Structures are given as C-alpha cells and as structure tokens.
Image: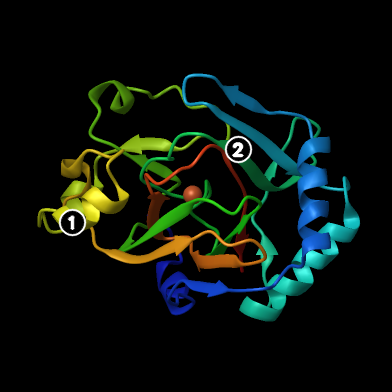
C-alpha cells in the first residue's frame, strides 16, 4: 500500500476531459515525435507497439505539455521511469490494435505521492473506460487468468499481476448492458464489483486527466489502430 495514502486521497478528483487543448499543428508534432522515437516493445501477440517519450527529443513539446497540464492540475512533477542511460522517460506512446486490459498505473514506489495521469489521443477513434474503483498498491494488471497470475518475473517498469481487486470491492456482478457495450474483451467475472465512472471517447485535441489510483482499461470498441500518449505525475 502507498504510505502517503491520506495525502494521495486529498488530491483526488473526478476524471476530467478538456477539449481543444491541443491544435492540429501541435498534434502533428506529437505524431512526428512518435515516429522519430525508437521502438521499445513490439508485442506481436498483443499487437501493440510501445515507444517511450524520451527527454530531450523535443524540448518544445515538453514545455508545451508542462504548461498546458499545469494549467489544468496545478504544480506537479513527472513520475518518470529511467531508460538504460538513466535518462528520464516522460511518458509512453502506445499503438494498439487490441484493447488493453484492466489495470491501475499507481507507480512503482510506494513512498511517492502519486497524482494525476493524462491520456492524449493521437488518433480519433478509440475509447477508455475509467471505473469509480481505486487501488493504492503498485501498478497492477487485474486478471483472473491463471497463467497471467503466475507471472512473477517482472522486469523494471512492468506491472504486477493480481486478482486482489475481487477481494477489495463488493462482488456485485458487473452491469450486463455496459459489459456488452464496452468491455467484451474482459471476462465479466473479472469486473465484479466495478462500476464505470466515465467512458472517454477519444477526440483529437482533447486530453483525459484522472487519478492514478483509478482502475481503467480500453473499451472493446477499436476500429483499426489507435495511438495514445500517456504520462504519469506525482506531487
Ligand atoms: Fe493505464
């Protein structure tokens, strides 16, 4: 569990979508940066390409991002992982053809005061489901898949696997209609006790900001590929 859980809770707020935060030129710069960055992971099975937003690749975008996000959430620090050269990783670009499963991005250091995370869509089609439910451990993928739960040999920056969420929240069956509409890629049993707070329909120029304690996943509605940029902040 996070040590500063009281402070973390005091900073929490409802998920927020800000429209028209970035213009077309700025979005094109983010996409260009995405093209220029080296590929970190190309998981052919999951059909996902991940690229780390490395510091000093485009300082103009770093300043732009910091200024715009500071305007929305106030003072923050980036909660960065480090790359092999000990340089900061500012965020993660993900290009995916399949929905990403249920997880939380609560970080890898229980001493930090985790704050908000942001999602900037770089393609217009896609959606993300934010649940009301919160978790205060490390970054974790929530699953009931036995094979997945056996994965213990985690590399730096990899999420833990757990089914603890089913112990924490009341085992109320998940809403059938919402399941069919948004979450068919998950097993419905894996969603017991969860309630949707917000379904964020990706829109170019907008940004989604939400607490890092929130459980979330992609919705099953994917039309071809989607590219998004996620960043994580702390106080
Ligand atoms: Fe996430």
Mark 1 closeness class: few <14, some 14–19, many ≥20 residues within 10 Å: few
> Disc 1 marks which residue?
177
Nearer to me, 111 or 188: 188
The residue shown at (48%, 42%) is: 223
Q: Are marks 2 and 1 in contact (CB under 8 Å)?
A: no
The residue shown at (27%, 42%) is: 184
Q: Is residue 190 left or right of residue 20?
A: left
The residue shown at (24%, 44%) is: 164
Q: Quarter of the image containing the C terminus?
A: bottom right
* Location of residue 208 with respect to 165 vertically, above or below: below
Nearer to me, 4 or 123: 123
Query: Residue 59 location in percent, x, y?
Result: 89, 55
Q: Which mark is residue 95?
A: 2
Query: Residue 63 location in percent, x, y?
Result: 84, 65
Q: Is residue 210 left or right of residue 54?
A: left
Q: Helix, strand or loop at disc 2?
A: strand
The residue shown at (61%, 74%) is: 19
Q: Helix, strand or loop at disc 1?
A: helix
Q: Is residue 107 left or right of residue 82?
A: left
Q: Within the image, what quadrant is residue 150 found in?
A: top left
Query: Residue 35 location in percent, x, y?
Result: 79, 37
Q: Is residue 154 visible?
A: yes
Label 2 vs label 1, nearer the camera: 1
């Amino acid at each position: 569990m996070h040590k500063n859980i009281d402070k973390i809770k005091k900073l929490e707020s409802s998920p927020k979508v800000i429209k028209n935060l970035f213009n077309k030129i700025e979005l094109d710069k983010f996409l260009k940066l995405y093209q220029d960055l080296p590929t970190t992971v190309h998981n052919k099975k999951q059909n996902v390409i991940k690229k780390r937003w490395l510091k000093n690749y485009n300082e103009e975008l770093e300043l732009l991002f910091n200024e715009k996000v500071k305007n929305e959430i106030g003072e923050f620090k980036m909660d960065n992982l480090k790359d092999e050269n000990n340089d900061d990783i500012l965020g993660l670009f993900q290009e995916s053809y399949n929905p990403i499963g249920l997880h939380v991005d609560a970080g890898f250091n229980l001493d930090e005061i985790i704050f908000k995370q942001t999602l900037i869509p770089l393609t217009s089609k896609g959606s993300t489901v934010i649940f009301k439910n919160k978790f205060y451990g490390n970054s974790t993928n929530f699953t009931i898949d036995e094979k997945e739960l056996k994965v213990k040999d985690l590399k730096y920056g990899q999420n833990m696997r757990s089914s603890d969420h089913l112990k924490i929240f009341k085992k109320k069956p998940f809403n059938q209609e919402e399941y069919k509409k948004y979450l068919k890629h998950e097993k419905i049993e894996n969603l017991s006790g969860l309630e949707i707070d917000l379904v964020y329909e990706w829109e170019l120029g907008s940004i989604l900001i939400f607490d890092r304690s929130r459980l979330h996943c992609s919705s099953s509605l994917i039309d071809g590929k989607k590219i998004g940029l996620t960043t994580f902040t702390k106080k």
